[in-house]
Amino acid sequence: MDATDTGAVARLADLLARSLETGTPIARIPANACITSPAEAYRVQDMLRLGPIAGWKVGRKSPTATPIRAPLPASRLHRSGVTLPRDGLWRLEAELAFRLVRDLPPTDRAYDRSDVAAAVGEVVAVFEIVDSRFAAWPDLAPELALADLQSHGALVVGSAAPMPAKPAFAETPVRLVIDGGTVVERRGGNPAGDILDLLAWLANALAAAGKALRAGDLVTTGSTTGLLPLAPGSRAEAEFAGIGRVAVARSA
């Protein structure tokens, strides 16, 4: 990477850090702060002052697409039932998350699906609240969204169930209710395909970057219900059959 690329990474990280601190969206991205690759986006993430990390988000648009990852700041975690301020984009995604009970440190071989499954203690129902530090969202280059924690706003953590001996998450029924009315009801719904495959990819990608998944980490795996708005004063609840529920409200 040349000096110009390094400068763009630093300048974009500074813009995002200021937006995260002040809550003011980035109205314009200077040409000298534009990045062009996922590798640069991950470098921007590494430069952000996020405080303690509670886990990671990982996802992909299809089973054959390359996954992407972003850290989950502990300061943005909330318990189910919380009412959050109305400000922001307020787009909801109902997701399944894994809570780890053992570390997955760098090793001399790649982790596979069975390795990571053995490290999962429980499966958790969560809502991710999507937000962006860019005023132009959603009209962004993918690298900019990735640098911005893949548009992470908050995570609402619901109830959980022990990791099943024979997981079949692609068939798990999910129901999303907003203000008492069902808006999504289906089996599965995550376009990524096998979410344990996603977890294995994440463990290996972090190890290659000199990082690691740790016991206690939460790992979200992408939306099963699409990306839906929640109006001011509204309440949403999602239920994953046999796993758990999660609820959140937006202040009026």
Image (spheres, helix red, strand yellow):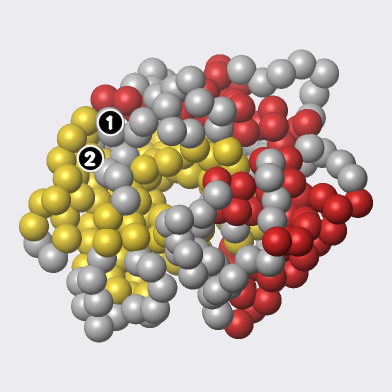
Which quarter shows the C terminus?
bottom left
Q: Which SS class for mark 1? A: loop
Q: Residue at x 82, y 50 (%)?
A: 5
Is 108 left, or right, of 94 in this rendering?
Answer: right
Q: Which residue is mark 2?
A: 174
Q: Which residue is mark 1?
A: 188
In front here: 44 or 123?
44
Point out residue 146 in the picture as x, y percentages from the top left corner: 59, 49
Circles 2, 1 touching at the beta carbon (< 8 Å): yes
Is 86 left, or right, of 60 in this rendering?
Answer: left
Point out residue 122 in the picture as x, y percentages from the top left corner: 45, 39
Q: Answer above or below: position of 125 versus 162.
A: below
Q: Amino acid at mark 2?
A: Val
Q: Residue at x 56, y 28 (%)?
A: 66
Q: Residue furthest left?
A: 181
In front here: 25 or 212?
25
Mark 1 surroundings within 10 Å by alpha-carbon count, few (fewer than 14), some (14 through 19), many (20 or more): some
Q: Residue at x 59, y 26 (%)?
A: 200
Q: Residue at x 44, y 22 (%)?
A: 63
Q: In the rendered structure, which disc, 2 or 1, sits on the residue that comes first in sequence? A: 2
Q: Amino acid at mark 1?
A: Gly
Point out residue 1 in the picture as x, y percentages from the top left corner: 86, 41
In front here: 217 or 3?
3
Point out residue 188 in the picture as x, y percentages from the top left corner: 27, 31
Q: Answer above or below: position of 207 versus 1.
A: above
Is 33 left, or right, of 115 in this rendering?
Answer: right
User: Which quarter of the figure has residue 31?
Assistant: bottom right
Is 204 left, or right, of 178 in this rendering?
Answer: right
Mark 2 surroundings within 10 Å by alpha-carbon count, few (fewer than 14), some (14 through 19), many (20 or more): many
